[in-house]
Structure formats: C-alpha cells, structure tokens
Amino acid sequence: MILIKDGRVIDPKSGMDETLDLIIRDGTITEMGKFQKSDDYDTVIDARGKIVAPGLIDVHVHFRDPGFTHKEDLESGARAAAAGGYTTVVCMANTNPVVDCKEVLCDLQRRASSLPIRVLNAAAVTVGLKSRKLTDMEALKQAGAVGFTDDGIPIQDVKLVLEAMRKAKQLGVPLSFHEEDPDLVGSPGINAGKIAQAVGVPGASSMAEETLIARDCLLALETGAVINIQHISSKVSVELVRMMKMLGVKVYAEVTPHHFSLNQEAVLEKGTFAKVNPPLRTEEDRYALIRGLKDDVIDIIATDHAPHSKEEKAEGILKAPSGLIGLETALALGITYLVRQGHMTLPHLLEKMTVKPAKLYNLDSGTIKIGGRADLIVFDEREKWVAERFHSKSENSPFIGTELVGKVKYTICSGRVVYQEEEGTYES
Ligand code: DOR
Ligand code: ZN
C-alpha cells in the first residue's frame, strides 16, 4: 500500500486541483482525502510542495525495436519514458521489420508485457511503409494495435489514404499522419530558406506539410474518419487545422516540445541535433504553435522521441538522420517554455499530455479517480536542472546544457514506483 501525502493533485479531466492525499492499493487508487501516516503503508511519499498528476501519455515514440536496437530498445525506451514521467507510450511502426503484420506486433506486445510502463503500438497503414498496399488493419486492430500510421514516410497515394480512412472509420480507430510530401521536400530536416542556405542544403518547405494536411483533412471530412496530424510545425498548418475543425473534420493535432521551444536558428548552434522532420521553422511559426496550443487547435503534446547514434549524427548535415530524443525533457520544456512564459496554466499543459492523448487512442488512463488505475507522476514545478545524461541509449538532444524548470520525482505505473529521482533508479 502506498500513501502519497500533501501533494497538489491536478486532474485535468475532472478539473480537480487541490491539496490531497492518495492511497494506492493493488494497483488502484482506492481513497483520496486526508490520512495519517502509519505502518500500514509500504511506502509513504512526501509530496509537500509538489504536483501529483496523472502519468503522462506520449502517443509518438520510436523505440527502434526490432531492428535498430543500438539506438534504443523496449527496455531502454521504457526507462527513458519512466524517467520523463510517462506511464503509457505509443510506438511508431518504422522498425525493421516494420510493424505491418500480426507476427511483428504480437512479438512486441509479448515483450512489452513485462515492462514497468505500458508500451503500446500503432501499426503501419501500408505494407512495408511503401504506400502501395494497405495492411490487414482489421487483424492488426484485433491483435492490439491502438491506431495506424506510416510515421516517418508520408503516404503519397491519395486513393490508398481514402481507402485507409474508410477502413479506420469502420473499425473505430484513429489514423495518424506524418505530413510532408516528398515531392516538395528538397532535403529533409532543415527548414527551406535562410538557414538551409546558410548550411548549404535545399531544405524542406512548410508547403510540403500544408498541402498534405489540407488533402487528408478533406478526405477525413468525406469519410468521417478520426485523424491526427503528427508533429504540426507551421503557422499555416495551425490555421488549416483550425478551419478544418470548424468544418467538422474529426482532426486532432500533435506538437512536439522541440517545435514549441526552438526555432530554425537552433540548427546553427546545435547542428544535426536540431535536424528533425518536419524541421524547426521560423519564430513566427513557433509562436503560432503556442497560440494553437493555447486556444486548443492543437490538442496533444507528443515527443516524437527519435533516438539516433552519435556516429550517425556526426555524418554531416545532409547525411545525418533526422530526429531527436524527447521523453526525458518534455515536461520540463512545457513548464519552461509554456507555463513559465505565461502562455498556459499547468493544468492546461497537463491536459495535453494526459487526457487528450488518451482520448485520441481510446485509452483507459490519463485521469485520477477512485477505482482508477494508479498511473501517477509526482514532480516539482519549480526545480531548475540542466539536461546532461539520459536513460535513453541515445543522447541526440539539442537541450543538453540548457537550464530547464520542472523535475520529475516519482513515476508510478499501475501502483508500482517505476522511477524515483533521488536514486535515479528504475525498477524492471
Ligand atoms: O525526425 C524524425 N525522425 N521524424 C520522424 O517523423 C521520424 C523520426 C525517426 O524515425 O527517426
Ligand atoms: Zn513523423
């Protein structure tokens, strides 16, 4: 039995925001109120001056397992997630082999079942992420896929997207889209324009993203499918999603912490660690993303945690792979760049990291309630720290050396302490 004492309990779903104690028994929150410490508890967590919130949910991570486990694997990814305050993550399908059939999916799920946090999967929309043939979405859904995406490789065939949406609507699952038309991308990872010119690459324009967002939202309007625009990055994209929501499109949008914290200038200082798809864009774009979060055009904060090795990232700006790790800095980036800057309240930030992602993928978590699963995070919203070392196998973060505010103290998943800051420990 665990007692979490005297924390400020924030539950964005119910609107609860008060100082309370929680009792956890057999993986479940059994009581909320005021309780005395006693020997009945195996663990008492002193949460005075700290925030207690639902465990975070990240609907966009790359754990590189199977196929690229020198960058990350299920265990190291779960460890990084727990250290970042996450109790549920959804892995993307761009592994080797691709998660496009039951065999690969079931193997992942079997191995994930012994991890201390919930590691779920989105399966591929098209076989081999090749934009030629749809996967057996029905079988994959039955086998446990929470949604479908070809993340990393945008789907070019419009007829296939239409067919996928009809199927997704019928199955009641969401489709998530990485929107960057390869025909309009000169070179990936750096915004086309002055920074791309300065580092000597053609770059990727926001038009490549915006045209596909318009296409897929219109297809979703026609089919009634629920869709999710992954890692939205430009001002026009935000305005498109705003308009599409007004037209009745069932569209969600995700933004990454790096897109709301940094602009394209970061490439000059951080080099390939700031190379990411879609690219970091202008300050005007960054501001539009923050506005989109504030007024709920953007529903979800998701990291796109994309580990790459030192050697690969050292290959030069044109050749190095795109992507950066994000699980261990996401909450602090939200607090530092959104809450402390006065753009959003803490409950509003947490809503986009708990309730909204749970809603998109129909997950039974993301809230604090009696009888509910004890997935919780305890953090200090004021503590300053500098990101230096990671639980992830990779360290491709542009935030190394940056002072951040907001530190995870405990992560509890299904009633077990899976991360405790003081010891930097993690239970497997
Ligand atoms: O920069 C990125 N890297 N964006 C993606 O969408 C995929 C990811 C990866 O898999 O490395
Ligand atoms: Zn992507």
Image (cartoon, grey):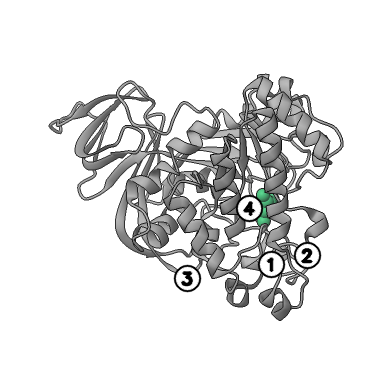
Which residue in the protein does label 2 denote?
Answer: 187
Amino acid on which disc 2 is placed: Ser
Label 3 vs 1, first from the N-terminus: 1
**Vertical relation: 407 (above or below) 47:** below
**Pointer 3 residue Cβ closer than 8 Å to ligand 1:** no
Any part of residue 382 in sight:
yes
Which callout, 3 or 2, points to the residue nearer the camera? Answer: 2
Q: Are marks 4 and 3 in contact (CB under 8 Å)?
A: no
Q: Residue at x 42, y 45 (%)?
A: 85
Q: Are marks 3 and 2 in contact (CB under 8 Å)?
A: no
Q: Are marks 1 and 2 in contact (CB under 8 Å)?
A: yes
Which residue in the protein does label 3 denote?
Answer: 401
Left or right: 39 as drawn, with respect to 275: left
Which residue in the protein does label 4 denote?
Answer: 306
Q: Is 131 or 417 nearer to us in this picture?
A: 131
| Kind of element beneath mark 4 | loop
Q: Are marks 1 and 4 in contact (CB under 8 Å)?
A: no
Label 3 vs 2, first from the N-terminus: 2
Q: Residues within 10 Å of mark 1 (few under 14, many from 20)?
A: many
Q: Position of residue 318 (x, y in %)?
A: 77, 69
Which callout, 2 or 4, points to the residue nearer the camera? Answer: 2
Amino acid on which disc 3 is placed: Gly
Left or right: 8 as drawn, with respect to 226: left
Which residue in the protein does label 1 denote?
Answer: 190
**Pointer 4 residue Cβ closer than 8 Å to ligand 1:** yes
**Vertical relation: 86 (above or below) 293:** above
Residues under labels 3 and 1: Cα distance? 22 Å
Q: Residues within 10 Å of mark 4 (few under 14, many from 20)?
A: many
Q: Position of residue 247 (x, y in %)?
A: 58, 38
